[in-house]
Each structure stands twice: as C-alpha cells, then as structure tokens.
Amino acid sequence: MKFGVVMFPGSNCDRDTFHVLKDVLGRDTVFLWHKDHDLRGVDTVVLPGGFSYGDYLRSGAIARFSPLMQEVRAFAHRGGHVLGICNGFQILLELGLLPGAMLRNKGLKFLCEFVHIRVENARTDFTRAATKGRVLRIPIAHFDGNYYAPEGVYAGLLRTNRVVFRYSDADGRIAADANVNGSMGSIAGIINDGGNVLGLMPHPERASESLLGSEDGRVIFESLIASRIAGKRLKK
Amino acid sequence: MDDKIIKDHGLTPGEYGDIVRLIGKQPNLTELGIFSVMWSEHCGYKSSRVYLKGLPTKGKHVIQGPGENAGILDIGDGLAVVFKIESHNHPSFIEPYQGAATGVGGILRDIFTMGARPIAVMDSLRFGPLDDPLNRSVMEGVVSGIAGYGNSIGIPTVGGEIQFDPGYSLNPLVNVFALGLAEKDRIFYARAEGAGNPVLYVGAKTGRDGIHGATMASAEFGKDTEHKRPNVQVGDPFKEKLLLEACLEVMATDMIVGIQDMGAAGLTCSTTEMAAKAGSGMDVDLDLVPQREEGMTPYEILLSESQERMLICAKKDRVKEVQAIFARWDLDAVIIGHVTDGGRLKVRFKGAEVVDIPVDAVVNLCPTYRRPVKAPAYLRKVAKLPEIPVPDDFGAAFLEVIASPSVADKEWIFRQYDHMIQINTAFLPGADAAVLRIKGSRRALAMTLDGNSLYAYLDPRAGGKIAVAEACRNLACVGARPIGVTNCLNFGNPEKPEVMWQFKEAVAGLSEACEAFEIPVTGGNVSLYNDTEGASIHPTPVLGVVGLIEDIGKAVRPGFRSNGDVVILLGENRDELGGSEYLKVMFGLQQGVPPAIDLARERAVHELCLEAAGLGLLRSAHDISDGGLAVCLAESAFLGDRKPGCSIDLGDRIRPDALLFGETQSRIVVTASPRRAAGLLSLAKKRKVRASRIGRVGGADIVVRVRRREVLRVPVATAFKSWKESIPSRYKIKG
C-alpha cells in the first residue's frame, strides 16, 4: 500500500500529511511533484491543503491545469483512490471529479478551529473503519469552505448517498450554528459516483495524534488502508 | 549638496559632514540615499545603541546573540531555535492589511535566511479603543493581513497578546515574532566571502514599492500620513513560500557561502551588510537586477523595499546547481555581481559607475548618540491615586473588567489565524504560553509575548522588569524553563529627552530582570518615533521569551480540571491597585504606582511551579496578571473543558477591590488533586515560597469570600458570555 502526497507550489499541508501517513501510520509514502507526469506507482493520491499557486484566482482554479493533475484525473477514472483535503477538495471540484463549488465562509472570515463532523455514510472505502453516525472531532482551516451545488446536483448527492460527512455538534445533531461555514446541507465531505474520490474540508492529518488533541482523523486513513487490504484479498 | 535634500533624507548637517569625511568625497544622490536608509534610526539604532549594550547577551544556550538577522539558541539533540521579533508599526497604520502582512513576511525571511524552517509566529498588537470605528477597521485590517500572509505561507500563528489604549489610536503597534527550527550545524550567515564568488539575486522582481520605508519608520507622523501610502510594500505570501522552500533546499547542500534577505533598505542593506560582515567588497550591475517596472533609476532600484527577495553569495563552481533549484521553484536567480577584495561597494548602471563607497562606513560607522534625557513631568502627577471608592457590587465590576477588550476572549482574532498547521501545536491559543511539540522528541518548545505599557508609562523601569517577569511566569505556568529573549522596544521620538529617559529606564529594567532570570537577549528591534501629531505612545517594551519543556507529557494547562481539586495560590496578595486594568476600566484612571516587583521572590515562585510541574503535582496553572485574581479564576474556569466554577476563601486583611482586581506580581493560581495538595504545600514550604490553599474547584459559580463575607458570586455561564462576546459584539452589524 503506497500513498502519494501531491506538492503543488503553495501546498502547505503536504509535509503534515506525509508525516502522518509515513511516521504515524507507518505506510510507504512519497511526494508527487506537480510538474511531473509520474504517479510513481502509488495506490492512493492525496491532494493536501494549502494555497496551490497562491489561490489568487479561485481556490484550486489553477492547480487543475498542472501536468500532474492530468495523470490524477486518468488515475481516478481508472478507479484509483483520490483523497482531497481542504484545498485538495477545492481542486477536485475545479477538476470536475466532484460536483459543486465553494463559496466564501458565511461571516467572511478565515476559520481555524476544531469542529465536529458526523459520518453519514460508512460504506465507502474512506470511512469503512467508522460507523454511520459516529462524530469525529477534527479541525478546519479555510476561507472558502461554504459548499454549494445547484438543487438538482444536491438532490442527486442525497439520492445516491454521496454526502459522507456533515458538520454537527458534539452530540451529532445537525444544526445551523454547528454549520460553521454555512455549507449547503451542512456538507463537510462528499464522494464521487464511483466511490473512489473523496473530498472533505476538515483536516484529518491534524487529528491523528493524541498529543494534538484528537485522533479521530485517523479513521479516514485507516479506512483506506483497510479497503486496500480487503481489495487485494478480493482480487486473489 | 543642497541642504534641503540632506534634510529630506532625514540626515543632520553633522551626519552629512561625517559621510563626506568617511567616503572622502561629496556623495552623489544615490550614495546619499544609501546612507540615508542605513543611517536611519530603524537600521542604525543610533539613539538606542548606547543603552542596548547593557543587555545581557551571554548564556549556555546561545549560539548567536544580537547582530545577525535573528538570535540562535542551542536546544539539544543537534537542534537550534532561531527567533526574533520585529515591529511593523508605521506601515500598519498607513495600510493595515499590507503593513501587517509584510511584517509577517519580513520576519519570516529573517528566520529562514539563517537556515531554519519557521514553525511559529506570534504577534503583539496595540490599538486604540474599539468603540471608535477607525480603530476597529485598523484592527480588522491588521488581523486579516497577518492571517492572509501566515495562513497562505503555512506558518502557524500560535499566540500573542493584544491591548487597547487611546494612545494607540493614531499609532497602532504591530510587533511580529517568528521562530524557526534548524539543525545546529547547518546555520547560515549574511556573509559575502571569497573574491570572485558570484552574488545572486533571487525571488521577486524589484519595483518602486517601499522606497524609503526605513526612513519613514524613523520619523514622526503628521497629518499628511495618507501621502505615505506608496511607501508601504505589498506582500505576496505565495512567492515567499516558493522562496522559503527553494532557499531551504539550497541550504541543505553546500553550494552557498552566505545569504541575506532584502528587508528594510532592500538591495542596499543586503549588499553592504554581506560585504561588511566578511570584510569584503562587492561589484554590482543594476542592469542585471530583475525589474517589474521600466525606467527605474539606480536610486530607486537600490532603495526599493519590494518583498520576497534574497541575496545569495554562491560558491563559484556551484552557481548552475543553485540556479537549477530556483528554476524548479519557478524563481529568478540571477547573477548581479561578485565579491571583491577591498571593502568597497561599486555599483554600475547602464555602463556608468553610480556608487563607489566603503561598506564599513555604511554598515558599521553610523553615528551613535547619547541623547539628552529628562524624567517626564507627568510622573509626579500620575503617581498619586485619588480616593478610590469600594464598590457595592463586585459582580457588576467583575463583569465589566472581564469584558474589557484587553482582558476579554481573543478567539475572534486567533480563529482567523491558522494556528495548527505544521501539526506541532500542542496547546491552542489562550494558554499562558504557546506549546509546540518537537517531532521525534519528548521535549517541547514554549513561547510567549508580554508587555504592559501602562506599567511602563507609570514607571518605565518597573514596566521593563515586569514584562520579563510576566513572560517567564507564563512559561513557568506551562512547565517551561526560559532559555532566551528577544525584545521589541516601541517608544516615541528619541529627540524628546522625556522619551529617551523612558527608554533608558525601561532598558535598565529589562536588563536587570534578564540578569535575575539568567536569560540572554539574543536580539530584537527598536521602533522609535511612535508619535503622531506630536503625542508619543506609552512606552511599550514587548518581550518574546522562549522556553524548553523537558517532557511534553508534563506540560501544564491553564484550565480547571476536576470538581474537588484544591485551588492553591503561589505567592502572596498585597494591597496594590496602581496601574491596574480595574482602575482603567471602572474609573478611567491610568494612575498610581505599578505593582512592586521583587525579582528574587518572582523567580522562587517560578522555580516552585516548575518543580511541581515536573513532579506531576499540578492539574492546572495560570498566572495572575491583567485584571488580578478575579480574572485569573474566571479564565481558569473558562479554559477548563467542562468550565467548572470555584469556591474561594481569602483571609487577607486587604481592601476587597485590591484583593480581587489588584495586579500584585509573582502570583500563580494552581490546582492539585486532593491527594497531591499536601505534597505541593510542603514543597513550597521547603522552597520557602508562600503557598496557600484558597479553595476548591466545583459548582456552577465563581464564588469569592473574604474573611467569611461573600464578595463575589457570578455564574460561570454569565461571566463566560461577557468574556466571549465582548470583541465579536463590537464587530456585529447592528440592524
């Protein structure tokens, strides 16, 4: 099982994500450089948080054009696992691998804080180690995390059970004041039709060591690892 | 040269005479411009140097003291911390967002130019009262600017401090601290050595922005401040992120000799300093400098303060490799000159020589002044307090003090900063000190910024001492031992004898306290001329102290933990109200004698707290500072996970207002489990530090009784609401 963490110019959670995958979870992990066309044989591509290319236009709008992303798009279409965290989620939206768009947070401020998200669908490769309804305590850090999709698209997400995480309170209640950035339907993370591309705004890599206040984020990485192992067994 | 031109460059006739004597000719305009910035107060420290020399700078951890881009301390395990604080006051008033943003960008370059990866930023901010819409917009701009830069480049803003006073309405203070981690044997200095070695310009292109920024920072503001907006630089955190990564990549090899960032005075400062520090000279061709505007003069190119640029002296045979690394990060890395022997800076432009001066004169021979000093007349007036009535209702006073913006919750500010990126932040903002783990180690770093300008106004020497004492106390509370200091000294116009007296006194206080705590000063920054329309700010010395925790598992948090825990006061209460937040908030008084400070007693309290933390005796620890014991208890309640109340019984024969709100120094409120309390008290006895059991954690209220009479009972929930909503409510749009 090999993870690849993409480095765009302006990525700034790349080293954090690498640290968790490699040093905390002990998995083979490599960096992938934005100018390359080589995915270096990884099983899962992680698009980390940051301000790719400065994000002076729309968040993620430039990153989608980078050479490496053409490979990532093909990889995703082949069924490869792609996890987009924060800016990575924004890039997946710009790339069209996930539907919808991000608006500025309600309140028009950058927000960095621990929030709670509820697992809405535990039958994905990214959440299978969790249970439906489990509440995870994970930090957010973004300016543009207010998820929006046209009504029809939103209805489609609901119908196909593709909303994977929602902002909630500590007890798992979905409420307006727990929806920190004003996202449509309190959406914190969604998955694609094929179930192999997930984007979420909270940072699981910041909640993977007890010293930092929470280990709840690990369940996402551990699910991916478990999925891989299960997948291999299936193939055999 | 025309007298008016000399004056416009902020130079006196005497200084001009010095220049002519030192360079052996009349300077041309470009050369005059170079001296003007390098001999400005901001770069030359000409008024402050005689006093700064008295600060202790030696210690067992010190690798690099003052005089480089930043100070360096050895923290063991082959690692070093590189840290410094710098002011960006003047630009932040003219253009709050960019002023603050480039303040962050500038200090970060000071850190990574030495080979360290920046891992933390903190800010010390001062604004006028938030009731004034102008002050609100300045604060909002500054906070957004810090966030905009720090969040994008990916360095966490982990803490800081902020206070409000009318004196800062037209002269806010923005002091930015940054700290980086380096391998001890991979530290780089600003040196251009080895004749023939190429000098590379890397990073952003040069424009006309920020010309004479350093000179601007060395003059008072008048009514024409608006016109100075073009002097403020514009930051590009994305460019700096690339620069940071590329520089660190280059510095991981042995391709370069030395490196210096271009901050104040831009290309002028970096070329002359790098040459002067190595005893070399430099030839530079300005036609090779990447420019983003056409028609720039040599004067403009040399004095531009465009951001995100560095100067590198590379090894002759490694230039191509250096350039390849920068190209990978899509950055310019252009040879603009080379190192020479002979100690002169020679600059060519369109084929002609436009500058030829000795670098030593520019960098090392700036005149220093022992300016006249005089104790200000106001001191006698403010020392005496009028009769202070004891209020009937302490509850109302308490709610008002905790809602004072200087005391109130700062979440509105720090949630705009990414304070968790790099995943080292073990204590979130709001604790006595920021605590960062060191990956792969049990040890942790703690850091804090402190300064109380009201104390410093009432008694600058006491203000200086207390700033150090409080910073070290904050570190003791989290279980960290202080190892080094950086300071930012914000004062008014040094040509006023009263301001210079404040400066001299404050530095003497700092010096004495740093000696007492055995912590070296490794550098810092002086910001003078903080005057607008003739009025000086309160003297504002700000201290940044870095500490070490041997075992992060033993770090102590400020919040109350469990019902039934015993509340113990380390130190003793005294009848002191002078200079308190209480008098300021309730009576509008900035008067009285600031609390007395006995440095030996202070240190004994810290040592006790540190030993108790190391032995695992403490459930929580929080120091008593602004707002006194009552505020300390309230904050301890708010910062607890379940926000428990407490019940406190005090026996002191002191006015109850002084007991609740007085700011007597050398006090820490700790809690211990009932099983550990006796052990803690006997440890205190052994160490001859006063420690008293004053109550218990529990209940839904904060209750204080003085000699069995209840003087305060406020539900934690009510107090929390006042504290929490104070700052956000000032930014709510009223319908």
Image: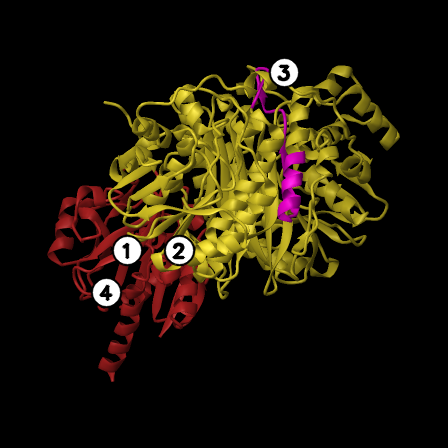
Chain colours: A red, B yellow
Indicate whether residue B513 is drawn in magenta.
Answer: yes
Same chain, marks 3 and 4? no
Position of residue B254 measured from the top left corner of the image (x, y, whole percent): 67, 62
- A5 vs B392, left or right, is right
Secondary structure at numbered mark 2: helix
Same chain, marks 3 and 1? no
- Of badges 4 and 1, nearer the viewer stands 1
Residue found at x 70% / y 37%: B52
Disc marking residue A137:
1
- Asked if the residues shown at circle 4 and circle 1 are in contact, with their CB atoms under 8 angstroms apart, the answer is no
Indicate whether residue B54 is drawn in magenta.
Answer: no
> Along the line of sight, which residue is nearer the eye, B118 or B430?
B430
Same chain, marks 4 and 1? yes
Disc marking residue B667:
none
> Along the line of sight, which residue is nearer the eye, B71 or B708?
B708
- Asked if the residues shown at circle 2 and circle 3 are in contact, with their CB atoms under 8 angstroms apart, the answer is no
The answer to whether residue B114 shows anywhere in this view is no
Report crowding for label 2: few under 14, some 14 to 19, many 20 or more residues within 10 A (C-alpha): some
